[in-house]
Image (cartoon, rainbow, N blue to C red):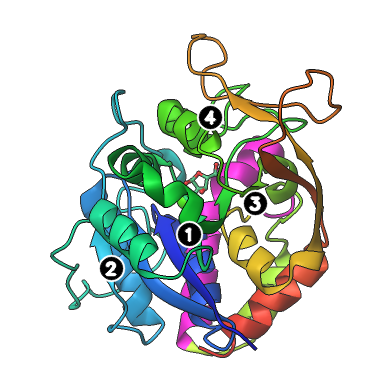
Amino acid sequence: MQRRKIIIDTDPGQDDAAAIMLALASPDELDVLGLTAVAGNVPLSFTSRNLRIVCELCGRPDAKVYEGALKPLNRPQVTAEHVHGKTGLDGAELPEPTMVAQEQNAIDFIIETLRREPEGTVTLCTLGPLTNIAMALTKAPDIASRVQELVMMGGGLFEGGNITPAAEFNIYVDPEAAKIVFGAGIPVVMMPLDVTHQLLTTKARVEKIAALGNRPSQVLVEWLAFFERFDIEKYGSDGGPLHDPSVIAYLLKPDLFTGRHCNVEIETESELTVGMTVADWWGVTGRTANATFMRHVDADGFFELLTERVGRL
Ligand code: RIB
Ligand code: CA
């Protein structure tokens, strides 16, 4: 089977960590060319540190980690320590990473990789704000046609927002970046809150991960216990939504998801709704479809996949 070449752009975050674990536990299917850190849940210094912690936890100190944007394109940084804790990976005690980030910055790595690899053979997997991708597209517009697919966690429609009533965090942090990405003509697959709010870390599901008994699973359970508390309080649910691994699960088992190819525009002007992903689900605008908006997921199938793979680490 042809391994799929991917770049993971991320702002770890406990749910990002789960996504990275899922990817690194799937070397037969996924060739992770590099992992790029972006400011998001916490500042870049922490997202880079956290990314390297996760790679070492997965036994991959050889993984190539790159550092990208310190802040959004032209807005003040917004972070989410209230959800992820001060470090962004609160919940488990782990040593500082020993592996270092690459000298090359993330934006140049993304550009160089897309120009080097055969056209249409690299998938971008984004788990945080889209600042790095937007900067790469602005610096090198020629790379847009070379991307196989951009699979992203972000946005929402029927579920509304999570950082404001209208906007999901990854889009809200850098709406101008999202506008650039959604307007670049790249095949986009969206994992919005409409999907990720179906992926709840219920007690039964977390117990299955805990039962695996390997160190990475034990740490993941500790991270999830910290990460989910905010959403359990907010939504009164059994467990919290596990957002980012949906991106990697799509690459491994796309049939877990169903959605619709439609037009998605990003609100960047209105104070009230900035960062909203205005998805034309019912096709009323006549605007050109530019993304596959996923709306349903087989949640049990997703957690079976995540649990089985993390058990391999
Ligand atoms: O809104 C959820 C998204 O914002 C997730 O990617 C989470 O890690 C944060 O980045
Ligand atoms: Ca994230």
Mark 4, ligand 1, within 8 Å: the answer is: yes
Kindly indicate whether the residue at mark 1 contacts the one at mark 4 (C-beta within 8 angstroms): no
Dot 1 lies on which element? helix
Question: Is residue 225 a member of the stretch shown in magenta?
Answer: yes
Which numbered disc covers residue 16? 1
Camera sees residue 288: yes
Q: Earlier in the sequence, mark 2 or mark 4?
A: 2
Residue denoted by label 3: 240
Q: Indicate the amino acid at tag 3.
A: Gly
- Marks 1 & 2, CB-CB < 8 Å contact: no
Q: Residue at x 24, y 55 (%)?
A: 108
User: Is 145 placed left or right of 295 in the picture?
Assistant: left
N-term mark: 4 or 1:
1
C-alpha gap between disc 4 and disc 1:
17 Å
Q: Quadrant of residue 33?
A: bottom left
Which quadrant does the N terminus fall into? bottom right
Q: Are marks 2 and 4 in contact (CB under 8 Å)?
A: no
